[in-house]
């Protein structure tokens, strides 16, 4: 984590889609910033894709995200280059959003005065290589989940890491997680909690048929490849719980660390472990 002292001059404010509360807060924040001679653009409808103002304008030096972790995930994936992101949690649970509503304006004062730190988080680039030769590309911040549908039987997935065969899973699916995503679906499936700045990838099977197939952690310098070896079952790939596609027999999912990182603005003074204690109610 590094200290930052530069002043932001071109700011985007992105609100959670279909949330009147987030939209109203976005307009109030924009007015507050404009009164301080700052250029501000507001996006109150991110839709199912990237926020429109971010897709059309790459000159922002700060993006303020109002909503929750889901909104921040969609924003982070859409940025073409590293831009500082300040997440404001308007919901209940959030590991990515830095501050709550009651901290919003005191934190903005600190940020605009250059009193903040920046923490870099890794993204992953993912390709679906179809058996017929087609390639589809995605980017993920939390995780990629390969899973069968509710009515499908156990599926077989062959895993290789860095070109080396690891195993063939017979399971309900597999979670490929970034360190940031270790506290998401990975945690619910029994995977390890990983410090979010570690250069690793977490691989967690979902309900494996063999008890000895446990979650593993590998260096993110290695390319992870997972091939679907089951026919005639409905299997889906989901990215950050927000987008995805159906997988067919012999399709391969290829994941590697992206050259683009996410830069999260830190002003609260809370550490990752402080958040774990608070969000997971440790010690209570």
Image (spheres, rainbow, N blue to C red):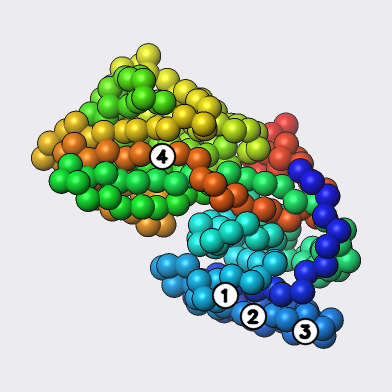
User: As drawn, is 45 to the left or to the right of 9?
Assistant: left
- Residue 22 visible at all: yes
Residue 128 image offset from top left, x and y in percent: 30, 46
**Residue drawn 39% across the image and 52% down it:** 138
Q: Residues within 10 Å of mark 4 (few under 14, many from 20)?
A: many
Mark closer to the chain start, 3 or 4: 3
**Closest to the observer, 109 or 218:** 218
Mark closer to the chain start, 3 or 1: 3
Q: Nearer the viewer, mark 3 or mark 4?
A: 4
Q: Is residue 86 above or below residue 131?
A: below
Residue 89 image offset from top left, x and y in percent: 66, 61
Mark closer to the chain start, 2 or 1: 2
Q: How crowded is mark 1: few (under 14 residues within 10 Å), some or many (20 or more)?
A: few
- Which numbered dot is residue 255? 4
Label 3 secondary element: helix
**Closest to the observer, 225 or 189:** 225
Query: Distance of mark 3 from mark 1, alpha carbons?
Result: 18 Å
Mark closer to the chain start, 2 or 3: 3
Query: Distance of mark 2 from mark 4, alpha carbons?
Result: 33 Å
**Residue designated by label 2:** 41
**Residue designated by label 3:** 34
Residue 90 image offset from top left, x and y in percent: 64, 64
Label 4 secondary element: strand
Mark closer to the chain start, 4 or 1: 1
User: As drawn, is 30 to the left or to the right of 167?
Assistant: right
Query: Distance of mark 2 from mark 3, alpha carbons?
Result: 10 Å
**Residue drawn 35% across the image and 46% down it:** 127
Residue 182 occupies quadrant: top right
**Residue designated by label 1:** 57
Label 1 secondary element: loop
């Amino acid at each position: 984590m590094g200290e930052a002292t530069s002043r932001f001059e071109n700011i985007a404010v992105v609100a959670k889609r279909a949330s009147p509360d987030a939209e109203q807060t976005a307009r109030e924040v924009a007015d507050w910033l404009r009164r301080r001679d700052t250029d501000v653009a507001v996006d109150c409808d991110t839709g199912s894709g990237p926020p429109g103002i971010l897709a059309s304008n790459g000159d922002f030096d700060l993006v303020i995200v109002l909503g929750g972790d889901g909104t921040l995930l969609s924003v982070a994936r859409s940025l073409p280059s590293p831009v500082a992101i300040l997440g404001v949690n308007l919901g209940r649970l959030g590991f990515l959003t830095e501050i709550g509503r009651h901290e919003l304006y005191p934190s903005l004062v600190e940020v605009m005065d250059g009193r903040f730190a920046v923490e870099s988080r890794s993204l992953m680039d993912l390709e679906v290589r179809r058996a017929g030769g087609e390639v589809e590309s995605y980017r993920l911040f939390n995780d990629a989940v390969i899973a069968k549908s509710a009515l499908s039987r156990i599926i077989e997935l062959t895993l290789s890491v860095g070109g080396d065969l690891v195993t063939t899973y017979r399971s309900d699916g597999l979670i490929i997680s970034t360190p940031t995503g270790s506290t998401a679906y990975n945690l619910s499936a029994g995977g390890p909690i990983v410090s979010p700045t570690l250069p690793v990838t977490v691989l967690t099977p979902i309900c494996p048929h063999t008890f000895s197939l446990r979650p593993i952690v590998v260096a993110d310098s290695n390319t992870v490849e997972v091939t679907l070896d089951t026919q005639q079952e409905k299997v889906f790939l989901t990215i950050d719980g927000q987008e995805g596609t159906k997988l067919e027999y012999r399709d391969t999912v290829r994941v590697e660390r992206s050259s683009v990182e996410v830069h999260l603005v830190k002003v609260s003074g809370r550490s990752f472990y402080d958040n774990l204690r608070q969000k997971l109610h440790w010690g209570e």
